[in-house]
Image (spheres, coloured by chain):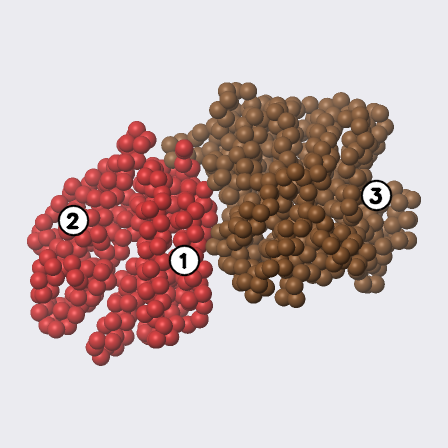
Amino acid sequence: MTTLGKTAGGLYWMFRYLERSENTARMVDVGQRIALTRSSDDDEWASVLQAAGTYEGYLAKHGEVTRDHAIDWMLRDADNPSSVLSVVSTARDNARVVRTALTREVWEAVNEAYITLKGAMARRIGDRELQDVLRLVRQRAAFVRGATHGTMLRNDVYDFCRLGMFTERADCTARILDVKYFVLLPAAAAVGSRLDDIQWETILRSVSGVGAYRMRFGQQLRPREVADFLIHDRTMPRSLAFCARKLRENLDYLAEDYGARMHSHEVVADMNDKKLAQPIDEIFQSGLHEFLVDFQGCIASLSSQIEIDYRFYR
Amino acid sequence: MNDSAIFDEMWGHGETPRAPYADIDGWFNQEDPARLRRKAREAEALFRLTGITFNVYGDKAAGERLIPFDIVPRVIAGREWERLSRGIEQRVRAINAFLHDIYHRQEILRAGRVPVEAIARNAAFLPEMIGVDPPGGVYTHIVGTDLVRTGEDEFYVLEDNARTPSGVSYMLENRETMLAMFPELFMKTRVRQVSSYPAMLHRSLCASAPTHANGKPVVAVLTPGSYNSAYYEHSFLADKMGVQLVEGHDLRVVDGRVAMRTTQGYQPIDVLYRRVDDDWIDPLNFNPDSALGVPGIMDVYRAGGLTLANAPGTGIADDKAIYSYMPEIVEFYTGEKAILKNVPTWRCAEREALAYVLDNLPELVVKEVHGSGGYGMLIGPTASKKELAAFRQKLKARPGNYIAQPTLSLSTVPIFTRAGLAPRHVDLRPFVLVSPEGVTITPGGLTRVALKKGSLVVNSSQGGGTKDTWVLEE
């Protein structure tokens, strides 16, 4: 059966938004954790807001950064299009539009995620409920992923879901890595300090990678290894290399299905074979920040190329 | 038991349940009311999860609403259904013959059975359809005939809904919900199934395709979009039929065909089940402000490149002023007396009728000729003096805009309330499919029920609910 361009676009964005809901929840968790483990001023929240890509919007509304406002902004503020509640609602709107391309299980998982989270976040979330709410967000995203994995046919529809998910995830990991490195460690002075350790652990935690890192590299958290792990590790499901490979695979399935390779295939090949082929030392030499900015640009152009190639809008 | 003068479908006028309701009565008596209350709540949660919600026009703040569902089924005996469906089929065939005639030779006007003014001055008449032959000769592929009952053998047609009738998804989901919640009921009672409706709809649409489709037509459902009040139903039907759900901006005219934008380019469509009204379907030919339609689709249609279901211009057949001529229309085209009754109707455009209506307003129901959804109507017996006075003015100002009918004492069916079973007024909308292969009526339909005691307004937009509708095997 053919797939409408609109449907492909709806699926792509539905899964981008769902992925974002989980990432945002994880970032709030990290911010909260730092606040609890050391006597912090609210600078931490500024960096969390930056990692979530919503710092400017936040400042426009609140002026100064406070913990309560930051958490509320990231989780449930309707003025923030990337708040968890906003993205889950947008994901569900997209799901409604592409309803016929989804299985009943996937639709119900998304709809239930929306109903449940809307209920759980109807009021400002107190300290005692925060962990429960964050767990609920992660759990609901996992339900949708599970229903998708378990019930959807492995055809072009599935490919567009996966493309959305891995695009968002790659973008998010790059952003976390960039903000943490660039904002929090402007001077080499802090390297090796206890503060440094906490920062790097924070990065890993926000991509659920602490345990995995320790298995690979041991207890000592070193910037080079952490960056290498999050950029190059092919077994780490949130690393740039992992996401880039999945993007390529899914585009390849589409090419096979449709019997046509598009410009997107060149963009994703470039991302895998050139950008991510640089060894970590080379990246550090020419600047991690520059690399990450470049990579995010690459993700953005892949996203708009997919949109053009598969006729999301015209 | 029923001690009121109104016919109750479970109790009749007596103390023992009528035969079709014997099993329901037995079931209810041995059920624990607390369990039933819990079940009723479960049903609501189930509907929310399914997303079978609707948006109320002009009421954004209200967000998504759920049409209340009552767990007591409405039961129709096989024999009763037999007669109803014969009557509906006769009526639907007459409507299609009428539409063909009105847009071609207009024999019925020449014969003087329907006055020329009733057509000529009617906004629902579409001059663009004159001389057009829809593929397969079918105008109304989908009809939802609204019926009410007033006694053991008294059924009336209230409206013929020949444009884009909705509600069939409720017929199907209500049954699914009852099957899931009370499977034991269906083991005892043999209820005719409704679940094949989407398959029959698909078959019926395919059979109505233009000949160039060569037996493998591409079918799609056209929706105004996800903010439309019936969007759930549009996506539901597309999903169950396994066809694309498209919006106006997914479509464009390419090489004389209507085509949809897919991930691999434009693909032509043969049959479009459109849930967009005539006015909005083509900004080039009708309302130029419409963003819901497809520019030029009417030209493709007139050239035979596409089947539109229903055909444009079918509104002339379910118009409330034309309704009053239905007995003549049925007789004119079928040569038979109408099996189903028409509600006596005063056309306020006629001087004598208007005088009668103004004199008897407190006993009558007055409806707008082009209205739907229960908006803009007056129910005389329950209206206040002020409302009556206001309506009197409206009637005098634009009499042609209204028809009036006696207030029928609609039958009741029990609903489940905290105090036990309580009678409420109902109507019935069976769904009819028409194709060159014939007429198919799904045994069942949508029963709408006024949840407020004594209320006659069953419309979901005004607080009505729904019930599962059972047609029993003979």
Which is in the foreground here, disc 2 or disc 3?
Answer: 3
Q: How many marks?
A: 3
Identity of the amino acid at label 1?
A: Ala
**Dot 3: few (<14), some (14–19), or many (≥20) neighbours within 10 Å?**
few
Colour-to-chain, red: A
Q: Identify the mark at residue B344; answer none if there is no mark.
A: 3
Q: Quadrant of residue A160?
A: top left
Instruction: State the residue lying farthest toward the bottom.
Output: A39
Please give the residue where the numbered disc 2 appears in the rendered image: A234
Q: Do the residues at pointers 2 and 3 share their chain? A: no
| Image side of residue A228 versus residue B399, left or right | left
Q: Secondary structure at mark 1?
A: helix
**Dot 1: few (<14), some (14–19), or many (≥20) neighbours within 10 Å?**
many
Check the picture and name the quadrant holding the C terminus of chain A.
top left
Q: Secondary structure at mark 3?
A: loop
| Residue B340 position within the rendered picture, expressed as x and y whole percent measured from the top left | 77, 37
| Residue A18 position within the rendered picture, expressed as x and y whole percent measured from the top left | 35, 54
Check the picture and name the quadrant holding the N terminus of chain A.
top left
Identity of the amino acid at label 2?
A: Arg
- Residue in the picture at 43% in, 52% down: A108
Please give the residue where the numbered disc 1 appears in the rendered image: A113
Identity of the amino acid at label 3?
A: Pro
User: Relative to the observer, which residue lies in front, B81 or B246?
Assistant: B81
C-alpha span from label 3 to label 1:
52 Å
Query: Chain B colour?
Result: brown
